[in-house]
Amino acid sequence: MKKLLSLFLIIILSAGFFPGCKKDKGDPPTMPPLGSMIIDFSNFVNLKKSSNLLSDQKGTENSNWEFASAVAGFWNSLITITLAVPVASFSRAIDQDPVYLDNKTWQWKYNVSLIGVTYTARLTGQIGTNNVIWKMYVSSNSFTEFVWFEGTSKLDGTGGQWILNESSSSQTAFLQIDWTKTGSSVGSIKYEYVKADSFNGSNVQYTLTSSTSASYDVHYYNGVKFSDVDIEWNPTSHSGRVRSSDYLLGDWYCWNDQKINVNCE
């Protein structure tokens, strides 16, 4: 009996001396918002083919808005076409429940279907001392565990950076995204084209000041030379203005809530 009691005490005391035997998961890292990867280009989508909004505006023009739309469209195509798979993969991660792996690392794993192809996405987030390290692995029938993007974010989820690779056939850094969150929404996000070609160094910074004030500060290669463009608009009324040294005389040119050219006040 004494031997059993002694053995029991040894087990109890040993458990107290080895707290590391119990894995303390803690909480998963704060997921960056979808807005950390996607600039809002909704005010500059050309709806001419699907809407008769402008067809009845005889004698009017919308060239000012069209110019701003063309500049914004270059950047929008990078996210919606070139990088559609990693963006779609990240957008699905936000709605998934993570599982704990080890070494303060959490994993989100799920399938994503896009244009008839099913991809397996595996997002990992490792909690560090000062930030969270993120990696998105994507697999399909034609490739396995391709790191399509990676990045870091602050522990409180108020800012960070993404590096997106160009495609599954080339793990070449293509687009760098820097973002900051103010309150409940992303207040500033910047795309920078980092691939080593003629567009290298092109960038656009989107700033949302309020529900009635937003802007793009653009520096990009227009196919001939680098150009600087400033675009400001009201996200509520959709009116706005554009300025560029390549557009007319470099003055501000405006449009109203119907995207029709008007004099700037």
Image: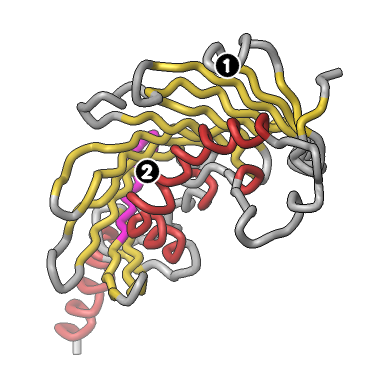
Q: Is residue 215 left or right of residue 223?
A: right
Rendered residue at 63%/18% (across/down): 243
Rendered residue at 64%/62% (across/down): 50
Principal secondary structure, stretch drawn in magenta: strand
What percent of the width, then of the height, locates residue 185? 64, 44
According to the image, label 2 marks what residue?
A: 132
Distance CA(mark 2)–CA(mark 1):
39 Å
The answer to whether residue 237 is seen in the rendering is yes
In magenta, the rendered stretch is 123-132
Picture quadrant of residue 201: top left
The answer to whether residue 17 is seen in the rendering is no
Rendered residue at 58%/44% (across/down): 41
What numbered label is drawn on residue 244? 1
Which amino acid is tagged 1?
Answer: Ser
Q: Is residue 265 left or right of residue 22?
A: right
Colour scheme employed for the rendering of this structure: secondary structure
Element at badge 2? strand
Which amino acid is tagged 2?
Answer: Val
Q: Nearer the viewer, mark 2 or mark 1?
A: 1
Q: Is residue 213 left or right of residue 98?
A: right
Rendered residue at 35%/71% (across/down): 115
Picture quadrant of residue 232: top right
Element at badge 1? strand
Does 186 sit above or below residue 82? above
What percent of the width, then of the height, locates residue 32? 48, 48
What percent of the width, then of the height, locates residue 145? 16, 61
